[in-house]
Image (cartoon, rainbow, N blue to C red):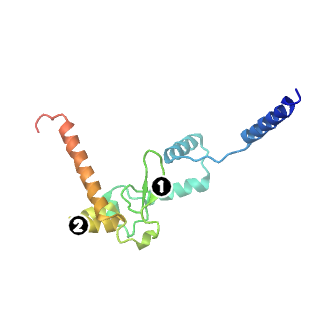
Amino acid sequence: MTMNAPAQDEADVLKSDDAAVDERKRSKTMSRKEMARDLRRRKLLGQVDPEEQALLTEIQGNRPKNRSDCVSSPRPCVFVSCKFNLYLDVNPETGSIKLNFPDKEIWELEYTCALDVAEKGGITLEEVGEIMNLTRERIRQVETRGLEKVRTAVETDPKRPGT
């Protein structure tokens, strides 16, 4: 019976430690979607900080709405949240951010917008690799996979009348 008493005391200590852990505030990682949802909720409830609201208004006012707004903007493009910006990528499933050029600042890039590259016209795999910070072989693999996706989509798409 004395053997069980120390084991019971240890169990009580462990339980009390678990309770203390549960009471602590823990940091929370939020995805981009959760943050957007939280901002929309706070806007509806009128709980947005005035400083945050002023910043959001300024960003919305300055951000290009379409390509014609963007084409004459100064380069490098500072709107890294734009889906065409080459500086970083956001995973749509997890919301995680990947810097494409971790050793460079945005103003050090020759091209910051994928639309600028597309307007340039046909370029070699080597040039695309240099712009995207990838090897020529990886660009070839991405191109092949993209073309395969287009072929599959065209083949599985039901024929529309008149086409």
Spot occupied by residue 83 in the image (x, y as percentages of width and height): 38, 55
Question: 59 or 98, which lies in front?
Answer: 98
From the image, state whether disc 2 or disc 1 is nearer to you: 2
> As drawn, is 140 to the left or to the right of 59?
left
Question: 117 or 2, which lies in front?
Answer: 2
Work out which quarter of the rendered image holds the N terminus and state it. top right
> As drawn, is 34 to the left or to the right of 72?
right
Spot occupied by residue 84 in the image (x, y as percentages of width and height): 36, 57
Under tag 2, what secondary structure? loop
Upstream in sequence: badge 2 or badge 1: 1
* Mark 1 crowdedness (10 Å alpha carbons): few <14, some 14-19, many ≥20: few
Q: Which residue is mark 1?
A: 97
* Mark 2 crowdedness (10 Å alpha carbons): few <14, some 14-19, many ≥20: few
Q: Residue at x 58, y 43 (%)?
A: 42
Q: Which residue is mark 2?
A: 124
Q: Residue furthest top?
A: 1
Spot occupied by residue 61 in the image (x, y as percentages of width and height): 45, 58
Res 104 quadrant in image: bottom left
Res 54 quadrant in image: bottom right
Residue 19, above or below 149: above
Question: 111 or 19, which lies in front?
Answer: 19
Residue 9, above or below 122: above
Residue 13, above or below 76: above
> As drawn, is 49 to the left or to the right of 17?
left
Residue 124, above or below 7: below
